[in-house]
Image: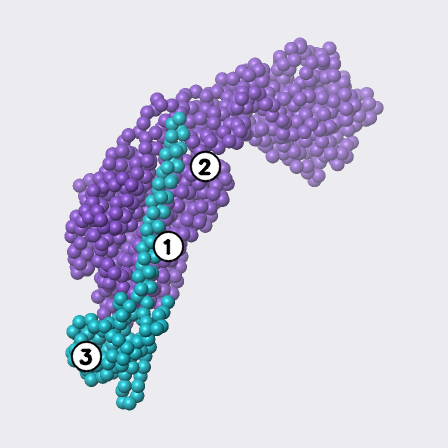
Chain colours: A cyan, B purple
Amino acid sequence: MNAILVFSLRLLLILLSYTFLGWIIYTIYMDLKRESALKEEKTTSLIFLSVKIEDEEITKRFRQPEIILGRDPSSDFFLNNETISLRHCRVFFRQKQWWVEDLKSTNGTYLNQGQVTTSTILTDGDKLTLGKVDITIRINQNIILE
Amino acid sequence: MINIFPYGDKSSPINQTQVKLISLAAIVIIIFALILSISPMIRYHSAAEGYRYDHWLGVAVWIAAFGLLHYQSSRKLPQRDPYILPIVSLLSGIGLMTIWRLYPNLGFRQSIWIALASALVFLGLNFPIFLDYLRRYKYIWLISGLLLTGLTIFMGTNPLGNGPTLWLEFLGIHFQPSEFLKILLIAFLASFLTDRQVFVYKKFDILLPTLFVIGSALALLVVQRDLGTATIFLLIYVGMIVSSKGNKLLFYGAPILAAILIGFAYFYIDVVKLRFDAWLNPFSDPSGASYQILQSLIAIAEGSIFGTGPGLGSPGLIPVSVSDFIFSSIAEELGLFGAGLMISLYIILLYRAIKLIKTTHHSFDRYLALGLTFYFGVQSILIIGGNIGLLPLTGVTLPFVSYGGSSLLVSFIAMLFLLIISKRVHANPQIEMVQRRRPILLSSLLIAVLGLEMIVTSLASFWFMPSLVNRPENPRWIVHDRFSERGKILDQDNQIIVTNIGQTGSFQRESNHIPLYPIIGYTNPTYGQTGIEESMFDYLRGYETYPAMTIFWQDLLYNQPPEGSDIRLTIDLELQKFADSLLGEEPGAIVLMNAQSGEILTMASHPYFDANKLEDSWQDLIDNEDAPLVNRATQGLYPPGSTLFPFVATTQIELIQQNEDPFSIMNGVPQLQTCATFPGTDLTWQAAMTHGCQDVQAKLAEFTDVNQLIELFQNLNFFSPPDIRLNVAQADSPNYDTPEALYKGQGAFNLTPLQMALAASALTNQGILPAPRLVNAYQDSTENWITLSKLGQNSQALGTDAAFWITSLLETPDSPHWQITSNVGTQDEQVITWFIAGTTADWRGQPTTVVVLLERDAPLLAEEIGLSLLEQSTQISLTNGQQ
């Protein structure tokens, strides 16, 4: 009788320890699913930043959710102008909107002539001024990337 | 789910996940402990043994420790990773129970260490800020770690008394500074890399200072022969530097450097060579270099899929089963399921650590998490790989599981670091940065290797299971023998020859007739098995006699074979005792057999031994020139001399019939001193053969073609060993170059007494050579006697007429038997004596033959022994051939 009891306990031991394992894997899987759903939410719409330097217009297209603008060559949008700080401002996608945020730049960031002091929503056709450089924003709302 | 642990904010999903997992782990550990409690009753098949209680103290400590840690972590670190603590709890719980099951005193100490380590983590959870101190004072920490490790060179001790002196003793507690150095080194590298990342760096800015640090640490460890830790250091270092800085030079240089280092160590450090050789050829030296790895593999195979069950296996047979080989110990008792669980837990732990590397915002945290990933990963890979034969043995500990205070403390501290790092991760994970791909890729490699180890483990416990379990190096049958009664060995009238004494757990063999031991053989944990005990292994333990389902259930429920089956020999114990008394102290052998059925009624080999006193007398037995351990009847090879005479005579029937006596073919007077006994003055053929006149025999043989002679001997099975359930000597092969040996029966031509007895039976049994039979029957599970078939086949060795003619010629007047005595010099200048005899056609009873061999020149004694025995067995009075 004891032998049967111990054998059932052994089976239970295996069963429960794999329940433990399965549970962890299940909850991790659910986490991942939730995360990827979150990520999906964060999928950006296309944004074009154009700048006019010496009558030449440079347009760059971005897909990433965060764009750093600045004089630092490693910035996402590199602007070689001494009125612009190394890391001047940040354009980012949050809650299905593009936002701009000043990164404590020396000469400040202006959106359609108004100074940006807090995170502000951008719309298609907005003009962003960094120091003495004007940047035109084009946002294509229709293209939602996967 | 019952939540047996109190915790802070009940609504937090993190707390809920953690508490459910820890509760589940607690139930698993409680069931484990419950099985351990009942296991003695299973092993001993009775309630008398009672339960085991002591390990419940460990369970209590474990529950208290992890209950507190859970409580504290949910209060202090609300945003922590909820999987790390439950995984650690299950790992350390299984480890603790396994240690306690093996050595209760070590289990007790491990419980104390778990309590201490948990107390430390508890404190650490109150002051998570200490991570910053670790970073800020990195040099002080590192140097003190190095100094402590260096101190072991001068003040090191070893808790076992000998071996590498890697420990420092303080107030009676041993601790191993190199374990702590691991974590300090990781912390140092993490803070160093954090400090340097801001600047544009040159390769050597990073490489040189860290190389200096790691070099000095390695030098210390190599001096102290702590090579396992050195390997871990090196791997963690390379892993951290390469994955954080992508240093190509180091990435490609490291394998080359490793190869050089290993090569160097292989030739200059003995233990490295030993470990590598054992790894490359695990089956080459099963009792020496590869003993550990082979025993570990056998234990894993023994566990198979389900395991033997906690407390029911024999993991104590694995060397260092509580530390280096704890993985195999767990695999034996919990099976592939348990081993898979352990590896999966490590994989998830690594996965969570890698996730921290991915999501953390602080550089220091990232590098620290990276280092800890490598710490857990490298260590578990090395030790599990060593246990399953995938990697050479490194002698490091399995984190959280192995016995060892220092290692447990450091593993817990590492867990604390991970918990604190996980708390600092931002609640809403940001998008991954590009440069983090490399560390994630490299550390994912660790998971892949663990996955590979899982596959290799399943190969050992499933695919290669039968071949590993059945290896002769597997000593578990010795344990089984003590717990399951083996079958008795009976004589042909069911008189007991060998039985068991003692009770479950201490069964032992006992013989009623000690002189029979060379035939019965011994069963000894140290020296193995011989004789019938060896050849009838599967019957005596029921493996052959029970239905497969019975064996399967016995194995599954008890991890024991069923009660063994009795076997019945053809030996007649009365005759055997008589034969042994006749032979007395003479070195020699006797075979008495039924010439028709091949049943061996008596087999004696003197001097003999007592199998129950092997331990005390082993060296004497081995050194003894008379070799008592050898069964002379089947393993002793002796030149046949003129016992060949009657067989050779069958090829020259015409010649003998034409010449009335041997004088006419001798070309002179035969040299009668070559006869074993005096044949009388008027030498007849009968007298020449009976008295073993070698001179006459050699002359007669010369008339015979060597090919004809060899054919005759082949028919008599002189060149092939008999098929009998005993170890037999390799038979000589026919040699055409030295026909002299075949003619004279001397030199490079030898026979065992058993071969001789079978050939003699062919004379008595109308030319038919019987196949020998020693084991008659076994008793199956329903107590019916089942006859065992003979291993060999009877064969016609001589013509029926020829056999009849020669036995008639040889027949002693007034007595229904023939006999031959001969003496012959062996190659090592010793003289031996043969006496062979058998009944003739005039005898109406069982045709019987007897062979007596004495290892000295004693023809009269041999004749006396042989005739008395033949008389006793046939119950007739025989007249001596001489009179």
- What residue is shown at x 31% (from left), y 55% (from top)? A31
On the same chain: label 1 and label 3? no
Q: Residues within 10 Å of mark 3 (few under 14, many from 20)?
A: some
Nearest the viewer among A9 and B628 is A9
Name the residue beneath numbered marker 3.
Answer: A110
Kind of element beneath mark 3: strand
Residue A30, how many percent across, how many down? 33, 54
The image position of residue B568, as x and y in percent, is 56, 21
Query: Looking at the image, which residue is at 37% across and 54% down?
Result: B447
Q: Position of residue B326 (x, y in %)?
A: 35, 42
Please tell me how many numbered marks the rendered image carries.
3
Residue pointed to by mark 1: B447
From the top left corner, tell me how far across and down residue A52 is, in percent: 27, 86
Residue to which mark 2 is pinned = B474
**Real-space Cα distance between discs 1 and 2?**
32 Å
Badge 1: residue crowd in 10 Å (few <14, some 14–19, many ≥20): many
Looking at the image, do the residues carrying marks 2 and 3 touch, with CB atoms under 8 Å apart?
Answer: no
